[in-house]
């Protein structure tokens, strides 16, 4: 339950004062081969503690995915600095697991082969790979579909497989790029509950990019509200909600928080139109 | 009842075509020279088969076109990869491929015979020259179009940059590359036959042109039927290979859940 | 400049021969080829043969497009026609069209008619297939909208199905265009007494290699320019596609 209580305790006691992710004054410009340069992020600074669940919220094009990609090491940091556990961020690696909106599963591999991929790269013995992969597949609820190909799976199942693949390598943090954006509303609800359940069983730092205010408030302890392009941090709001409550959607605290944050986002969303 | 008819329609069509041919030839509306009877043509194929002549010609043509096709496949895929991975290769090959693709490369046949003579080498070279273009084009499109999130996921899971080419780019590009190969195969056959017709000698093309020179009408028609069958079988084999290699592709699979 | 490597290749060609690295008998120098080509243009061998080729190719292709497109669209429109003719089209597609060269000669001799027939038969298939696929991909919703606005079945065919099929058809015709060049050159190389392909063979047999090279290059580039012009001309038709 009270992961927020646990975290609050950790914050207060200073145990979480060693920040896991530190972003300092980062700007990023896209330079396409044809067309003009685009300033996607401007002077963004942020600190994230271990095992925090943080949402990056903002309208389309506000650079939230860009920030995620910079932390993941997929884009080079040209201006400013990003440090992971004190060290400057490097090339992509299994310490920062990523989950994409369109799943990015290898279509020519079965679910099992996909989940085993990272484990193969780690150089584990074959039985160990099989064991861990199977455990992960069962944990996300895909037992029985190990030999299916991604094209045979529904959207929700594909995202579970992608999650299993990323979690199998035991990353220190999860970078999630609008992971439920491609799913229908019902599946999305189910997946949100699942993600929270997984996070509670296995607390990890999560950086969750979304444009859905309700989703952000539901899942995250802190919501980072970003402005329209060029992306700057407009506000950081703590949600302080009791996530054990199954009727959290109906609680006045939830509605107020969504309202508060929507007001911050609305102007930016209009600017992005 | 209607469904049964629709299902049988292909066979009905072919049988009807065959029957129409035979009847039309017998009717006397055209001379046996213009259109020999189907029965005569089939008989001819039979006797050529028994004497071994059919197999000799067919074998030669298949040998040349398939060897040329294989070389085109390897060369085309290799060059296609080189273009997407290497800037110099791209600068050099891009204009060559884009200008060469729409050219009737068969026009170069006399130059190739001038340089390489009248034997298998020149025929195979002509095939390679023609068939390599669709393979290169398909490979370039395929490897250039690999989703970057796929590559990022692989790196995220611990793949080293040099492993990406064989572990991600190639499998992701395979469907489109296969399509390029499926376009190249009929081209290989067409070109081989034209080359054989020009140079004469053994081979289905050579046999057909000889037949036409001797006004051997059944021979000409027999050749058409033989080549049509050979082409059909090869294309079907390719399609089968595609289904095997790309068993994971959405076009091949039934969904596991709704 | 995108085509710079080609220029460099041309210079390399000239250098290779002028420096004596390659024998003149095998590879006439670029300058020799250009000179011979110029002579050919002036003395008229080129124009007569060029006209013959143009006529054959143009006529055959025009027929192939007209008949092929009509057939393809009708096949998509009438299930019955599709069920019976479709398998034939599919079975004949892999047949190398060049196999028809001897039979067209048998029927119509060495002149224009056999080439026109060859190109018509050979090029009809890609056009038919493209028209068929294009017509089939026409969304049902569009047809129903038109019907509900009062269009008769025939009008729907003309107003909705044909325009929907156009982009795919345009691509099919592009394939047919390239194929027409191949079939034209092939048949002229083997069984003709006039035409650019015939001219190449004639010059080759006479040992006049620089002129032969010239005509080969002209034919090759004609194919290239035809394709480029076609793309330019059809750009507007494809413009509304997303």
Image (cartoon, grey):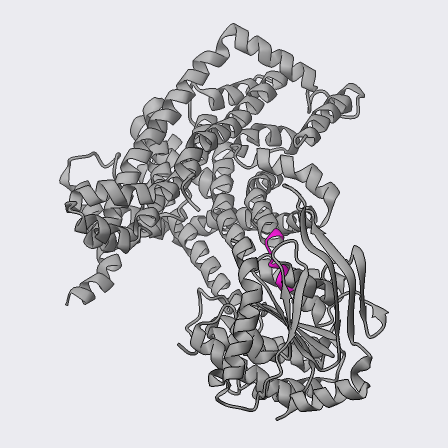
Image position of B159 with respect to C25: above or below: below
- Apparent side of residue A27 relative to residue C218 in the rendered image (left or right): right
Residue A110 in picture, x, y percent from top left: 56, 76
Image position of A115 with respect to C60: above or below: below
In this view of the protein, which residue sits in the foreground, A47 or A124?
A: A47
Residue at the extreme top: C43
In this view of the protein, which residue sits in the foreground, A107 or B220?
A: A107
Image position of A265 with respect to C210: above or below: below
**Residue located 61% across and 12% down the image:** C36
- Apparent side of residue B192 relative to residue B112 in the rendered image (left or right): left
**Residue located 42% across and 74% down the image:** B255
Quadrant (top left/top right/bottom left/bottom right) for the N terminus of chain C:
top right
Q: Which residues are magenta?
A: B144-150
Residue A7 in picture, x, y percent from top left: 71, 87
Question: How many numbered markers are drawn?
Answer: 0
Q: Is residue A266 visible?
A: yes
Residue at the extreme right: A87
**Residue located 46% across and 74% down the image:** A154
Quadrant for residue B215, please give it: top left
Magenta stretch contains residue B191: no
Residue B95 in picture, x, y percent from top left: 63, 35
Residue A217 in picture, x, y percent from top left: 57, 77
In this view of the protein, which residue sits in the foreground, A217 or B220?
A: A217
In this view of the protein, which residue sits in the foreground, C185 or A44?
A: A44
Q: Is residue A73 visible?
A: no
**Residue located 60% across and 31% down the image:** B113
- Apparent side of residue B225 relative to residue A10 in the rendered image (left or right): left
- Apparent side of residue B40 relative to residue A267 in the rendered image (left or right): left
């Amino acid at each position: 339950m009270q992961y927020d209580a646990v975290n609050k305790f950790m914050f207060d006691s200073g145990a979480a004062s060693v920040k896991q992710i530190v972003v300092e004054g980062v700007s990023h410009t896209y330079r396409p081969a044809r067309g003009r340069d685009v300033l996607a992020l401007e002077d963004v600074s942020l600190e994230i503690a271990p095992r925090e669940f943080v949402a990056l919220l903002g309208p389309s094009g506000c650079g939230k995915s860009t920030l995620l990609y910079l932390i993941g090491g997929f884009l080079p940091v040209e201006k400013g600095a990003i440090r992971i556990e004190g060290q400057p961020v490097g090339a992509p690696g299994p310490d920062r697991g990523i989950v994409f909106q369109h799943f990015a599963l290898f279509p020519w591999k079965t679910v099992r082969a996909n989940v085993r991929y990272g484990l193969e790269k780690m150089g584990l013995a074959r039985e160990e790979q099989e064991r861990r992969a199977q455990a992960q597949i069962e944990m996300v609820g895909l037992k029985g579909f190990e030999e299916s190909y991604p094209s045979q799976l529904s959207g929700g199942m594909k995202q579970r497989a992608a999650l299993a693949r990323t979690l199998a390598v035991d990353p220190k943090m999860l970078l999630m790029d609008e992971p439920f954006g491609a799913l229908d509303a019902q599946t999305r609800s189910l997946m949100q509950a699942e993600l929270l359940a997984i996070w509670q069983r296995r607390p990890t730092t999560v950086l969750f990019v979304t444009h859905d205010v309700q989703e952000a408030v539901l899942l995250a302890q802190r919501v980072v509200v970003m402005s329209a392009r060029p992306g700057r941090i407009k506000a950081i709001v703590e949600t302080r909600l009791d996530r054990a409550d199954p009727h959290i959607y109906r609680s006045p605290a939830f509605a107020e928080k969504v309202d508060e944050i929507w007001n911050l986002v609305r102007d930016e969303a209009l600017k992005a139109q | 009842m209607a469904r049964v008819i629709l299902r049988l329609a292909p066979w009905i069509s072919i049988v009807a075509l065959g029957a129409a041919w035979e009847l039309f030839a017998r009717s006397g509306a055209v001379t046996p020279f213009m259109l020999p009877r189907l029965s005569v043509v089939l008989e001819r194929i039979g006797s050529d088969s028994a004497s071994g002549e059919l197999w000799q010609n067919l074998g030669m043509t298949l040998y040349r076109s398939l060897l040329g096709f294989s070389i085109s496949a390897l060369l085309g895929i290799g060059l296609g990869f080189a273009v997407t991975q290497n800037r110099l290769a791209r600068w050099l090959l891009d204009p060559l491929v884009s200008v060469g693709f729409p050219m009737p490369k068969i026009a170069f046949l006399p130059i190739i015979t001038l340089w390489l003579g009248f034997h298998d080498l020149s025929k195979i070279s002509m095939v390679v020259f023609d068939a390599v273009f669709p393979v290169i084009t398909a490979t370039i499109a395929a490897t250039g179009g690999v989703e970057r999130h796929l590559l990022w996921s692989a790196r995220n899971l611990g793949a080293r940059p040099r492993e990406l080419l064989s572990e991600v780019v190639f499998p992701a590009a395979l469907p489109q590359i296969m399509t390029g190969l499926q376009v190249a195969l009929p081209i290989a056959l067409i070109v081989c036959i034209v080359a054989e017709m020009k140079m004469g000698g053994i081979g289905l093309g050579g046999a057909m042109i000889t037949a036409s020179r001797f006004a051997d009408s059944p021979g000409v028609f027999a050749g058409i039927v033989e080549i049509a069958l050979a082409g059909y079988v090869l294309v079907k084999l390719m399609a089968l290979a595609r289904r095997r290699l790309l068993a994971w592709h959405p076009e091949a699979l039934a969904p596991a859940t709704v | 400049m995108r085509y710079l490597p080609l220029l460099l290749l041309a210079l390399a060609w000239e250098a290779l021969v002028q420096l004596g690295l390659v024998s003149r008998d095998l590879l006439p120098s670029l300058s020799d080829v250009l000179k011979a080509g110029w002579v050919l243009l002036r003395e008229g061998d080129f124009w007569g043969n060029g006209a013959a080729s143009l006529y054959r190719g143009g006529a055959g292709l025009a027929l192939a497009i007209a008949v092929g497109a009509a057939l393809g669209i009708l096949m998509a429109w009438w299930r019955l026609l599709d069920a019976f003719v479709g398998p034939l089209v599919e079975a004949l597609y892999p047949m190398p069209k060049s196999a028809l060269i001897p039979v067209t000669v048998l029927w119509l001799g060495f002149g224009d008619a056999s080439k026109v027939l060859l190109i018509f038969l050979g090029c009809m298939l890609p056009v038919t297939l493209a028209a068929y696929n294009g017509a089939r991909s026409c969304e049902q919703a569009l047809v129903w909208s038109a019907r509900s606005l009062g269009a008769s079945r025939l009008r729907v065919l003309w107003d909705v199905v044909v325009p929907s099929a156009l982009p795919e058809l345009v691509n099919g015709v592009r394939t047919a265009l390239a194929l027409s060049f191949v079939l034209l050159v092939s048949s002229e190389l083997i069984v003709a007494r006039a035409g650019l392909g015939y001219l190449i063979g004639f010059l080759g047999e006479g040992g006049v290699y620089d002129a032969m090279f010239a005509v080969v290059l002209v034919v090759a580039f004609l194919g290239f320019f035809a394709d480029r012009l076609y793309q330019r001309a059809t750009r507007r038709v494809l413009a509304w596609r997303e």
